[in-house]
Image (cartoon, rainbow, N blue to C red):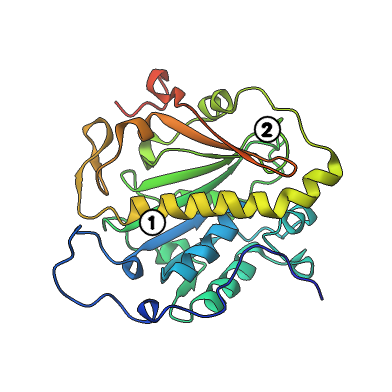
Amino acid sequence: MPTSAVPAVPAARHPQLRRTVSTGVRLDGRPPVTDLQLMFLGLSPVTAAAAVLLAGCGVRGFVISDPRPVTWDDAAAGAFDLPDVGRSRDLGVRQRIRAANPNAVALSDPARFTAEDRPSSLVIRAVDLSDPDGASLDLRAAAAEGRVRERQEVLDVVVPGGHAPGTTMLWPVRPWYARACTDCMAKAAGTAQPEPSRGARYDAWPTHTALAAAVLAQAVIAQAGAGGPEVGHRGHPSNGPVDGSAAEHVTVLHPGGPVSTIERVPNPQAACPLCAAG
């Protein structure tokens, strides 16, 4: 039975990933990737693929929360196999995490995410603005969001409305209390780009998902592994030093047939009276 190209599980794991980094002085002061604690609130094709890629990189601590069923579009995007359609999204991703990293612990209960105060923790939230009727919302997902502490840092992965399927925005990491509002997200998405033909889009969709997942995985490791608490954006406590220009820009990945494009647009939050952190 054919399987999807994403997520890519490594055929063999590097010996260094089988154990924690030996004790000693680390030159950059970063915690080892094996110490990262990640919670995925909601699963889009991009966040689902990124979770498995991160497990293959050595991350062991996961909480995956999204009981919604896998759709045909999720499978077409390459994040799930066709037999997964109709099954719980978090179940499939947790199984893939365990296949990628036997040392990983992938839980489904957000109450088990007890790493809010650790510098190596991060929440990755999938936000879908393409459904104006809110049919994709789940009460259990909303309850999970209510458990996140106000100063926990969150990285939003946004699917904007009115754009070609697969369009993904990676928001700068922000404290939970300063997460972006939907108006800012829609403003950053801008106008839709011309969509490739249906055949070309479906042919290139899995590769676009792989690209977006790789960019997201790098962003997660860079932020969640930034080290001890230091002063970050706008003077608020942060998991580590935050590049000022990165905090002011949103990364937008546009699907293409066959080439996807990556764009950086200004973050509109600075002028927003609702969600600005200052």
Residue 136 at x, y = what percent?
Answer: 68, 46
Apparent side of residue 32 relative to residue 137 in the rendered image (left or right): left
Residue 44 appears in the rendering: no
Q: Is residue 121 left or right of residue 216?
A: left
Residue that sits furthest to the left in the current view: 25
Q: In this figure, what is the number of numbered marks?
A: 2
Tell me what residue is drawn at x 65 percent, y 49 percent. 208
Q: Which mark is residue 221?
A: 1
Secondary element under disc 2, as helix, strand or loop, is loop
Q: Quadrant of residue 260?
A: top right
Tell me if 246 is positioned left or right of 193 in this view. Answer: left
Where does residue 256 sit, x and y in percent of width and height?
Answer: 71, 40
Residue sitting at 54 percent across and 66 percent down? 52
Position of residue 97 relative to residue 191, above or below, is below
For the residues labelled 1 and 2, the Cα–Cα distance comes to 28 Å
**Between discs 1 and 2, the one toward the N terminus:** 2
Would residue 82 be visible to someone looking at this image?
yes
Q: Quadrant of the C terminus?
A: top left
**Residue at the extreme front:** 259
Mark 1 and mark 2 in contact? Answer it, CB < 8 Å: no
Tell which of 89 and 208 is nearer to you.
208
The residue labelled by disc 2 is 161
Circle number at residue 133? none
| Residue 248 vertical position relative to residue 39 in the rendered view, above or below | above
Snapshot quadrant of residue 112: bottom left
* Mark 1: secondary structure: helix
Q: 10 Å neighbourhood of mark 2: few (<14), some, or many (≥20)?
A: some
- The percent coordinates of residue 82 (x first, y second) are 79, 66
The label nearer to you, 1 versus 2, is 1
User: How far from the left and from the top, in percent, is residue 24?
Assistant: 15, 73
Residue drawn at the location 34% of the way across and 54% of the way down: 224
